[in-house]
Image (cartoon, rainbow, N blue to C red):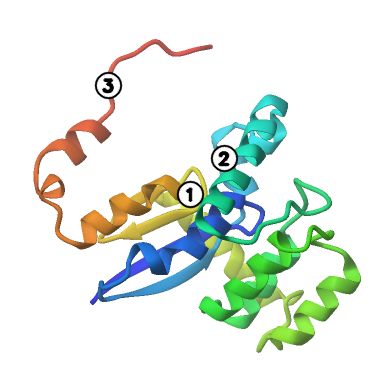
Amino acid sequence: MKRLTFWFDPISPFAYLAFERLPQVLEGLSYVVEYRPVLFAALLQHLGTKGPAEIEPKRAWTFRHVHWVAQHHGIPMDTPLQHPFNPLPLLRLAVACGPNRQVVETIFRHVWQGGADAVDATRLAALQAELAPALDPAGTEVKQRLREHTDEAIAKGLFGVPTIEVDGRQFWGLDALDMVADALHGGAWFDGPAWDREGAPRAGIRRG
């Protein structure tokens, strides 16, 4: 049985879609998934870059693209009332619950179905009551765990969400799901030199 780590932030529509599609893509395989909340904004800050929703032409394309993907795969999806938003309350709630698939599903659907404000105080209170976390989402222990997850992600070189980790290899993005499945099926490409060769640093022009 293979162990997958699914790094996510509910702010990402691609993470939501990847979460919804994962069971279908990996059908027939023996695996277990660990769901790891991480603050996407901290990854961006570490790398000195912006998220897709912070660059207007990219934001427009991103939401057109994800809604097409959603309808293509029959996944219900509504853009939340405000985006980007501060996902910290949702991330901390996930940590406080001990994020299993049911918890993560409830949080993702809270954000990406219905088109409401994802961090409206009344909705957040109702969500917390529904999930009944074992720990206080606003407590020091939960905040520290989320920081540790994020620091670990940065140390591993993660640059975006979703990222799926399998056997020490990281697969980024919704469109990497088939690649993950191929790796789990023992695809021959992964036994060759290409993974290491194409991931190695190489010379190139650098912008100042």
Residue at disc 1, secondary structure: helix
Q: Nearer the viewer, residue 10 or 149?
A: 10
Q: Residue at x 53, y 11 (%)?
A: 208
Q: Nearer the viewer, residue 74 or 174?
A: 74
Q: Amino acid at mark 2?
A: His
N-terminal of the pair, mark 1 or mark 2, is 2
Neighbourhood count class around disc 3 (C-alpha, 10 Å): few under 14, some 14–19, many 20 upward: few
Quadrant of the frame with the N terminus: bottom left
Residue 119 shown left or right of residue 181 in the figure: right
Please count the marks in the image: 3
Residue 143 visible within the image: no
Q: Amino acid at mark 1?
A: Ile
Q: Residue at x 71, y 63 (%)?
A: 113
Residue at mark 2 to residue at mark 3: CA–CA distance: 22 Å
CB atoms of marks 1 and 2 within 8 Å:
yes
Residue at disc 3, secondary structure: loop
Q: Which residue is mark 3?
A: 202
Residue 135 visible within the image: yes
Q: Residue at x 72, y 68 (%)?
A: 110
Residue 107 shown left or right of residue 28 in the figure: right
- Residue 163 x %, y %: 44, 53
Q: Which residue is mark 2?
A: 46
Q: Which residue is mark 1?
A: 154
Is 35 situated above or below 71?
below
Q: Amino acid at mark 3?
A: Arg
Is 107 situated above or below 102?
above
Residue at mark 1 to residue at mark 2: CA–CA distance: 8 Å
Q: Nearer the viewer, residue 82 or 166?
A: 82
Which mark's residue is nearer the viewer, 2 or 3?
3
Q: Residue at x 18, y 33 (%)?
A: 197
Q: Nearer the viewer, residue 27 or 71?
A: 71
